[in-house]
Image: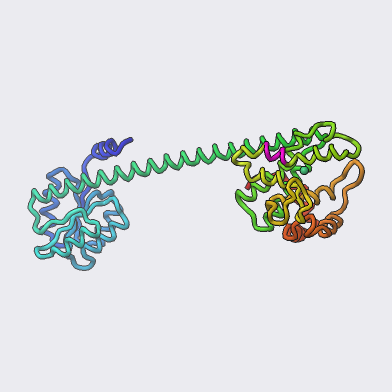
């Protein structure tokens, strides 16, 4: 609906309610009679306070008020009405020589002012102008509100759609990792546990929001490059030869190449490329040292070691959290970033067990 059709709708709603406020009975009676003859619905009162009550009770379109009255004056009434019934217009009646007061009335939101006693034609014209302006203001406000509601509804729809897209992304990543784990005849529990440990340590170190999500995705996808390692090497039961190791060690770079072209995985790709680095520079593929290794990869290294030590393997049982703590502490500053180790060491056994058993979450 347009502003114009809103105005038509308002105009069709019948006569306008006008309230006359003046302590002078003669003025009240003359104006009331005149306006009733013009077809308006008119009521009248002698003081400002009664006028405010009346205006609040009935749907008053317009108040015509004297400026000077005993008790509360017209300015007081003007201020109250602007605040309590902003849809009601006001025309002030001022005495001769009250120009300053009249200007003040306009400044405070009166639609118009007329000198007392008002000429009939001036009064009718002023009323028509005030009512027309009020209709336009009302229509504009209603139109604005309707637009705002529409924008709100569209925003909600868009947010829901984005959430759905986010969920699809997450499910796609999970499916990819599950496929990868299946190839190694494993469930994806390991990958998902490592994500949970990584995210917990990252949160302790102060990471949140999108940064935390990127670190989590990096941890989830860390071994994605193993897709490029031949079965004969990846699934070989015995020890690998030197050449086979060289081949195996290409998986961080392969993973990086797979992910680097996907904008929302750009940071996670850096973590994938660096997840086999060591804090002392003894890792691969680039032999990065210390803080040159992305923080997500430094945190992941601790989380991955923790899960490897505490999980069952075909050739040995998983060890206790205390054993994992001791081993990780032993490699503080060599294999692991001390800050990440210290953050990990704040977690007690109950907390670690809870994280291990928790429901998987990748975002938020
Ligand atoms: Fe790896």
Q: How far across and down, in percent of the image, does residue 111 sit?
A: 21, 53
Q: How far across and down, in percent of the image, does residue 32 sit?
A: 14, 51
Dividing the picture into quadrants, the one containing residue 291 is bottom right
Residue 96 can be seen, yes or no: yes
Relative horizontal placement of residue 105, taking residue 210 as reference (left or right): left
Ligand 1 quarter of the rendering: top right
Q: How far across and down, in percent of the image, does residue 171 sit?
A: 66, 36
- The image shows residue 284, relative to residue 244, as above or below, that is below
- The image shows residue 210, relative to residue 330, as above or below, that is above
Classify the position of the N terminus by image quarter: top left
Q: Residue at x 91, y 45 (%)?
A: 316
Residue 197 can be seen, yes or no: no
The magenta segment = 253-257
- Which is the main secondary structure of the residues drawn in magenta? helix
Nearer to me, 358 or 342: 342
Q: Residue at x 90, y 41 (%)?
A: 314
Dividing the picture into quadrants, the one containing residue 161 is top right
Residue 140 belongs to the span the image colors magenta: no
Q: Residue furthest bottom?
A: 71
Dividing the picture into quadrants, the one containing residue 109 is bottom left
């Amino acid at each position: 609906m347009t502003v114009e059709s809103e105005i038509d709708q308002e105009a069709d709603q019948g006569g306008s309610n006008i309230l006359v406020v003046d302590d002078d009975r003669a003025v009240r009676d003359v104006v009331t009679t005149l306006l009733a003859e013009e077809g308006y619905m008119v009521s009248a009162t002698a003081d400002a306070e009664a006028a405010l009550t009346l205006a609040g009770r009935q749907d008053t379109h317009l108040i015509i008020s004297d400026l000077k009255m005993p008790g509360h004056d017209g300015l007081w009434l003007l201020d109250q009405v602007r605040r309590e019934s902003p849809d009601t217009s006001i025309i002030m009646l001022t005495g001769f020589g009250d120009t300053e007061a009249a200007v003040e009335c306009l400044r405070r939101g009166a639609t118009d002012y007329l000198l007392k006693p008002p000429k009939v034609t001036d009064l009718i014209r002023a009323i028509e102008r005030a009512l027309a302006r009020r209709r336009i203001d009302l229509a504009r406000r209603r139109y604005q509100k309707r637009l705002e509601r529409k924008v709100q509804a569209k925003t909600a729809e868009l947010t829901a759609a984005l959430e759905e897209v986010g969920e699809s992304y997450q499910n796609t990543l999970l499916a990819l990792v599950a496929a990868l784990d299946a190839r190694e005849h494993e469930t994806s529990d390991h990958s998902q546990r490592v994500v949970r440990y990584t995210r917990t340590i990252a949160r302790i170190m102060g990471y949140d929001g999108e940064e935390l999500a990127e670190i989590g995705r990096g941890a989830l996808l860390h071994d994605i490059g193993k897709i490029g390692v031949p079965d004969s090497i990846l699934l070989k039961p015995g020890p690998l030869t030197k050449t086979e190791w060289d081949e195996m060690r290409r998986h961080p770079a392969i993973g990086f190449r797979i992910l680097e072209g996907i904008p929302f995985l750009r940071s996670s790709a850096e973590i994938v490329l660096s997840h086999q680095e060591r804090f002392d520079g003894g890792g691969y593929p680039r032999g990065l040292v210390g803080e040159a290794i992305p923080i997500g990869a430094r945190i992941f290294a601790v989380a991955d070691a923790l899960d490897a030590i505490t999980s069952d393997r075909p050739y040995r049982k998983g060890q206790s959290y205390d054993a994992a703590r001791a081993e990780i502490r032993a490699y503080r500053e060599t294999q692991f970033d001390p800050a990440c180790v210290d953050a990990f060491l704040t977690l007690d056994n109950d907390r670690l067990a809870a994280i291990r058993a928790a429901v998987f979450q990748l975002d938020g």
